[in-house]
Image (spheres, rainbow, N blue to C red):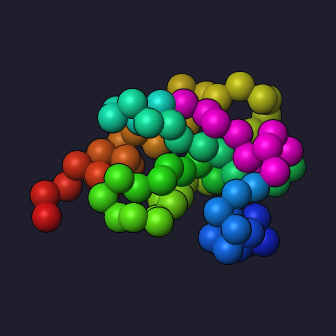
Amino acid sequence: MLARQTILADKAQLRSPDHWNTEGETPDGKRFYAIKVDKIRAYGWFSIRHKGVFFISHFAFKKGQKLASSDANRVIANWRKFEEQQP
């Protein structure tokens, strides 16, 4: 996972869909993503408040391929904490 995060930071991209999936939508209509390593996912989004920052919301162990509503809800809650906070 650390290697994938480093590649994303250095090259601003990962090979899709092997290592990178678009998963859902944030409250502002943008997308959030999953960095994939086997059955582990790191869910996150590109910040609208901090240019060039990719926030990782949380990590999850996946039993299947579909996005769980609990993971989507957690990303959205974390997105609100970081993107809607007052300066």
Above or below 24: residue 51? below
Above or below 25: residue 75? below
Point 79% across, 29% down: residue: 64
* Front one among 2 and 7: 7
Quarter holding residue 9: bottom right
Circle count: 0
17 inside magenta stretch: yes
Bounds of the magenta segment: 15-24
Point 53% across, 41% down: residue: 32
The location of residue 65, given as percent across then percent down, is 78, 29
* Front one among 2 and 51: 51
Quadrant where the N terminus is found in the figure: bottom right
Quadrant where the C terminus is found in the figure: bottom left
Q: In this view of the protein, can residue 46 be seen by the observer?
A: yes
The location of residue 19, given as percent across then percent down, is 80, 50
Q: In this view of the protein, can residue 60 be seen by the observer?
A: no
Point 73% across, 46% down: residue: 20
* Front one among 2 and 47: 47
Point 54% across, 50% down: residue: 44
The location of residue 70, given as percent across then percent down, is 52, 32
10 inside magenta stretch: no
The location of residue 45, given as percent across then percent down, is 50, 50
Side (left or right) of 71 relative to 53: right
Side (left or right) of 49 relative to 53: left
| Most distant residue in the left direction | 86
